[in-house]
Image (cartoon, grey):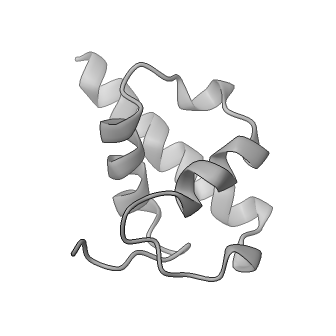
């Protein structure tokens, strides 16, 4: 079973989102969709209601960093 992840694990979530959606530009993703993508990740073990704009923004930026790194 994957390690449990929570809203505060922005870097790990960013890595997993990049692996799951490698062609998707994170900066084009609406927060409502980002919320769904995160809660659908294997290992997500937090309360979906504990999300907020700051946490989603941190996740989006971590994902964006992974996206840019993958482009080389």
Please count the marks in the image: 0
What residue is rendered at 24% in x and 71% in y? 2
16 left or right of 32 in image: left
Quadrant in which the N terminus is drawn: bottom left
**Residue situated in front as seen by the camera: 15 or 37:** 37
Residue at (77%, 68%) from the top-left corner? Answer: 52
Q: Quadrant of residue 41?
A: bottom left
Q: Is residue 63 left or right of residue 42?
A: right
Residue 24 lies, with reference to residue 8, above or below; the image says above
* Image quadrant occupied by the C terminus: top left
Residue 26: horizontal and vertical position, in percent? 55, 32
- Horizontal placement of 71 versus 47: left or right? left
Query: Picture quarter containing residue 5?
Result: bottom left
- Position of 44 relative to 31 (above/below): below
Which one is in front, 11 or 46? 46
> How far across and down, in percent of the image, does residue 63 sit?
45, 42
């Amino acid at each position: 079973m994957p390690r449990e992840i929570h809203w505060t694990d922005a870097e790990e979530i960013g890595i997993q989102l990049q692996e799951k959606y490698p062609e998707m530009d994170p900066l084009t993703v609406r927060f409502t969709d980002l919320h769904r993508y995160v809660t659908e990740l294997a290992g997500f073990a937090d309360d979906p209601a504990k999300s907020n704009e700051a946490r989603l923004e941190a996740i989006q930026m971590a994902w964006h960093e992974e996206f840019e790194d993958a482009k080389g």
